[in-house]
Image (cartoon, rainbow, N blue to C red):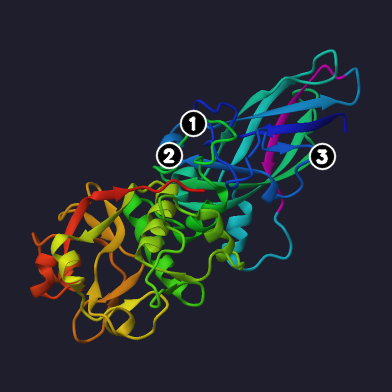
Amino acid sequence: MSIVLQAIAFNADSTNIIPDALNIRRNASQPVTVPEWQRGVTFTAADSLAAYSLEDVVGRPVTIHARFSRLLPQVVSAQVRAVQAPLPWPWTGIQGLLQAQINVLGEVAPETVVFLPNGNSAFVSFTLRNTRLSSCGVGVHHVRWHWQYRLGPGAPWLDFAFTEHTIYTVLRVPRSPWVQEPADIANIQLPWTDVLDFACRWARGARTPVEAAAAITRAVFFLGNGVLSYDCALGAAAYAFEVFLLSELIELLRGGVGRGHYVNCSDCAAIVATFSNAVGADLWQSRMGGALASQLGYFPVKPVRTIGSFTWGQPCGWWPGWTFHEVAWDDECTADDPVFDGSLQLDLYPPYRIPTTPTDLSFSLTRQWEWLYRPLLVPPDGWPLCEPMPLMRRRRPVI
């Protein structure tokens, strides 16, 4: 072996995501440093993280940057490339075979690396070829590369390094509360890979923001199978306040304590909107209710299944409704805009108990009523008490 791989940068330019990776961090306390792969520092795929906005890279050349050093002073330059690593053994089934053989980032096309007198190279730009970015949708991908070099055009290619990386693919640049600028490692509103670990798996394969948000909404409701449960004792928020206590929620999702498993509608709205926006949806957290409901103390609700419950009935079984209800809501959060509610299931065909998790359901009465959100949630005499409250819409910053 005559040369050594020293570093790989996926996000080489934090001011430009075309054809670069996104600015990301692991969580509130841990940044993702660039270069994302470093010799002697990075040992597994979980140590080398990068995310790509499909809207911004599909159809465009995608590049990475890598730096090398030489072991022999007579080596002035070399051609370098990276190819798909050999199939791991044993593999399981045809699907495993296909996934292991085809990297989502394809292969690294050959480039000439020139070594400086000190034995190191500058960072060299490499173009990726045969990527699967145009067909993969939202996902989390394990990329394996065998790096090879040759010292002349006719010389054989020689293996000299093996690297593994975790690559997240999202539909487009994450929306608020997530940001891309300023790309400062202290900016905790950069997208978190701790969130992408869940959101990209929940929405795996989604090709549109609506598909992604719907899949994440359903996944949040099914966290009721042992992780989350509607708070019938107090009905109080545990994670969604002026800020979203996302770090503590992630702790809970990973099997820890967090702030406990009891949640209310505001918590669920924050989870759905924040995780959906991380993969390219554009949702808000907004309320329904209004002055009349506040005066009465509630607006009535039809039998529903709240998160964590396996029975149908009024919320918590003893109170006929809510003073307000908060959901993830699209656009302007008005009567004609779609609702995504991960806190409950509605009866699609009362009284037959056909459960549906509300995803992309318009709130308004402008279309066939049985497919609209409010008529499924609220009996007709309660409609005047349950109106959109768009002035309450927000996107809680995460901590």
258 or 201, which lies in front? 258
Q: Residues within 10 Å of mark 2 (few under 14, many from 20)?
A: many
Q: Nearer the viewer, residue 273 or 12?
A: 273
- Contact between labelled residues 2 and 3, with CB atoms less than 8 Å apart: no
Q: Main secondary structure of the magenta part?
A: strand
The image position of residue 233, as x and y in percent, is 40, 77
Q: Quadrant of the N terminus?
A: top right
Mark nearer the N terminus (1 vs 3): 1
**Dot 3 or dot 2, earlier in sequence:** 3
The residue pinned by badge 2 equals 173
Q: Which residues are magenta?
A: 75-86
Disc 3, SS = loop
Q: Residue at x 50, y 46 (%)?
A: 169
Comparing 149 with 176, the one in front is 176
Query: How far apart are the alpha carbons under marks 1 and 2?
Result: 9 Å
Image location of residue 114, percent across then percent down:
76, 17
Can residue 215 be spotted in the picture? no
First in residue order: circle 1 vs circle 2: 1
Q: What type is the residue that disc 1 sits on?
A: Ile
Determine crowd level at label 1: few under 14, some 14-19, many 20+ residues with C-alpha closer than 10 A.
Answer: some
Q: Secondary structure at mark 1?
A: loop
Identify which amino acid the numbered label 2 is placed on: Val
Residue identified by numbered label 3: 40
Residue 17's tag is 1
